[in-house]
Image (tube, rainbow, N blue to C red):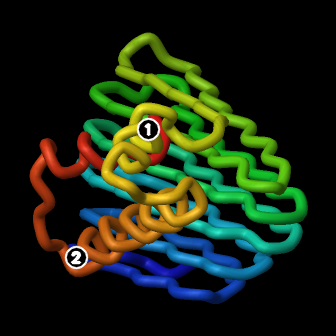
Amino acid sequence: MNNILMDNVINIINESKSLVLEVKNNLIINIFNENDIKMDINIIQHNNSILKINYLSINKEDSNVLINVLIKGNNNKCDINYHVISENGYSKSKVSVKANKNTFGNVITENLKGLKEGGNILIEPILEIDTNEVEASHFVTIGTYDEESLLYLNSLGIKENDAKKLLKMTVNALYVLTLHRKSVDNKSCHTIQLYI
């Protein structure tokens, strides 16, 4: 196990990885992949920690992603933002968070989104809660491009294929800004939403 003893940021770009981590303070994991991948992430959260996973993948071939978080302690925050764009192939994802029995004060959020652009997507969200003392929520959306955004860009004279490329580039740019911890205001994010 790799022990995380202080605030850390891990950036993974275009790599297939297998991670096993213990989080004792705060950890941000930013993952961006633009190819076929196999990703296996297993994390244990102890007491008073914050875990944030930001994941963006643009898949041109088959991919398989497994994210498992086990919350063993109290007063933790676990926030997983997982976005996949499937251009081709089959994108299979399983995102699982478990809060152990007798834990308390934990807050868990899974925000999982998939954009089908020629490929297929399966996203399996799992929340296993063995305690009553937790706030937990998960959201899963799989769809195509936001029609309002496409219509707006078309009204500006941008052809549909170019509008889709622009929207995808915007999502990538927002993600890169997240990697570098720069802020993006909510209005900008709302205007260029790709899928929500």
Residue 97 lies, in percent from the top left, at 57, 40
Residue 100 lies, in percent from the top left, at 54, 32
Which mark is in front, 1 or 2?
1
Q: Is residue 192 above or below residue 133?
A: below
Residue holding disc 2: 6
Residue in the image at 64% along x and 66% along y: 41
Q: Are the residues flagged by discs 1 and 2 in contact, CB closer than 8 Å? A: no
Q: Residue furthest front?
A: 157
Residue in the image at 80% along x and 43% along y: 122
Amino acid at dot 1 = Leu
Left or right: residue 187 versus residue 196 is left
Residue in the image at 52% along x and 71% along y: 21
Q: Quadrant of residue 5?
A: bottom left
Residue holding disc 1: 151
Left or right: residue 166 versus residue 65 is left
Q: Quadrant of residue 128?
A: top right
Amino acid at dot 2 = Met
Q: Is residue 5 visible?
A: no
Residue in the image at 70% along x and 78% along y: 18
| Quarter of the figure with the N terminus | bottom right
* Camera-side residue of 13 and 163: 163
Residue 37 lies, in percent from the top left, at 77, 77
